[in-house]
């Protein structure tokens, strides 16, 4: 699994958790039940709608061309950044001072 896919999946799961918790809490309050175990089919259908609703923010980030995490340009941005890091690392290695030569140990008397 590449980094962009993992980032998108993590984002969706965070959104899903928030949406499901909000829907369960709201449905409990509006239905007057004390536990989700008392939900009927209609209440669970409302909560199930959170599955697609949680994908909306993730989808919006995906189609955002300026989102560097997992947007449409994320792969190009990652490639460009990697190339610049490689170039900077090579340049730093060329200009880094060389370690001083070790002096031979003095003979023991």
Image (cartoon, rainbow, N blue to C red):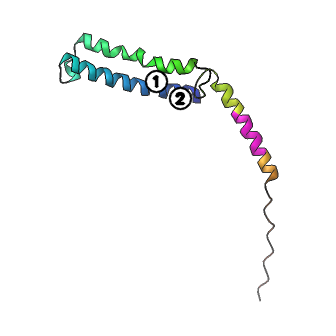
| Foreground residue among 67 and 104 | 67
Q: Is mark 2 on a helix, strand or loop?
A: helix
Q: How far apart are marks 2 and 1 (CA)?
A: 9 Å
Q: What element carries label 1?
A: helix
Q: Residue 49 in the image: state x and y as whole percent.
A: 36, 13
- Find residue 40 and report its image quarter: top left
Q: Residue at x 37, y 17 (%)?
A: 50
Looking at the image, the residue that sits furthest to the top is 42
Q: In which quarter of the image is the N terminus?
A: top right
Residue tagged 1: 12
Q: Residue 35 in the image: state x and y as whole percent.
A: 20, 24
Q: Above or below — where is 108 with respect to 22?
A: below
Judge left or right: residue 88 versus residue 58. Answer: right
Looking at the image, the residue that sits furthest to the bottom is 109
Magenta residue span: 81-90
Q: Is residue 65 magenta?
A: no
Q: Which residue is drawn at 58% across and 28% down?
A: 69
Residue 7 marker: 2
Q: Which residue is drawn at 52% across and 25% down?
A: 8
Q: Main secondary structure of the magenta part?
A: helix
Judge left or right: residue 83 versus residue 22. Answer: right
Q: How crowded is mark 1: few (under 14 residues within 10 Å), some or many (20 or more)?
A: many
The reply to whether the C-beta atoms of the residues labelled 2 and 1 are less than 8 Å apart is no
- Find residue 82 and report its image quarter: top right
Q: Quadrant of the C terminus?
A: bottom right
Q: Residue 92 in the image: state x and y as whole percent.
A: 77, 49
**N-terminal of the two: label 2 or label 1?**
2
Judge left or right: residue 65 versus residue 39. Answer: right
Q: Does the magenta stretch include residue 83?
A: yes
Q: Residue at x 31, y 13 (%)?
A: 46
Residue 99 marker: none
């Amino acid at each position: 699994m590449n980094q962009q896919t993992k980032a998108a999946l993590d984002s969706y799961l965070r959104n899903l958790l928030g949406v499901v918790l909000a829907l369960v809490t709201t449905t409990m309050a509006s239905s007057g039940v004390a536990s989700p175990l008392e939900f009927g089919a209609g209440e669970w259908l409302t909560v199930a709608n959170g599955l697609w609703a949680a994908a909306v923010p993730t989808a919006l980030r995906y189609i955002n061309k300026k989102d560097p995490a997992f947007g449409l340009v994320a792969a190009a941005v990652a490639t460009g950044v990697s190339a610049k890091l490689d170039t900077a690392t090579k340049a730093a290695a060329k200009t880094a001072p060389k370690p001083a030569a070790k002096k031979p140990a003095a003979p023991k008397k």
